[in-house]
Image (tube, rainbow, N blue to C red):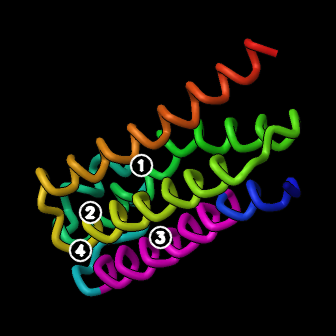
Amino acid sequence: MEIKYILQPVLAMGILTFIMTVWMYVVRVSAMVRLRIHPQKGQDTTKLRDLLPDKVNRVSNNYNHLFEQPILFYILALMIAVLNLVDATFVVVAWLYVAVRIVHSMIQATVDIVMLRFYVFLTSWVVLAFILFRTCWLVCSA
């Protein structure tokens, strides 16, 4: 199977991150203008969070989360590509991971029902663990 097929889900995660970045800046800047918060108060985002409504912070929280767990996904996908381990199983599971992360982002950035978000997050870890341990198996058993 061609290497590009494992890189397509990586690009999809990049697009998700880009979308969440734009969304975060749109809601954050518009809220700061509406609430008359001077941009300098954004120097320390922990203090800025106290000044902004929860619906604004939910989007920025999700943006931050896209630079946590997905980093392992990126590394594993690149390992799979570089080591030429790409097969249908990895590609399908990589797309499953992306789909679950999209659902997680939409839940967190909109309704933010914590237990629902937790179960989706847990699902993403199960999918990622499958990719991790399958990669370990293939690399270590070669």
Labels 4 and 1 touching (C-beta < 8 A): no
Query: Which one is in front, 42 or 118?
Result: 118
Circle 3 crowding by C-alpha within 10 Å: few under 14, some 14–19, many from 20: many
The magenta region covers 10-33
Horizontal arrangement in the rendering, residue 43 relative to residue 51 (left or right): right
Task: Indicate the secondary structure of the residue bearing disc 2.
Answer: helix
Disc 3 from disc 4: Cα separation: 12 Å
Numbered label attached to residue 110: 4
How far separated are the C-alphas under marks 4 and 1? 15 Å
Instruction: Please give the residue where the numbered disc 2 appears in the rendered image.
Output: 108
Q: Position of residue 38 (x, y in %)?
A: 36, 70
Number of marks drawn? 4
Label 2 vs label 4: CA separation?
Answer: 6 Å
Q: Residues within 10 Å of mark 2 (few under 14, many from 20)?
A: many
Is 38 located above or below residue 26 in the figure?
A: above
Dot label at residue 118? none
Judge from the rendering whether residue 94 lies leftward or rightward of residue 54; answer left or right: right
Q: Main secondary structure of the magenta part?
A: helix
Residue matched to label 3: 20
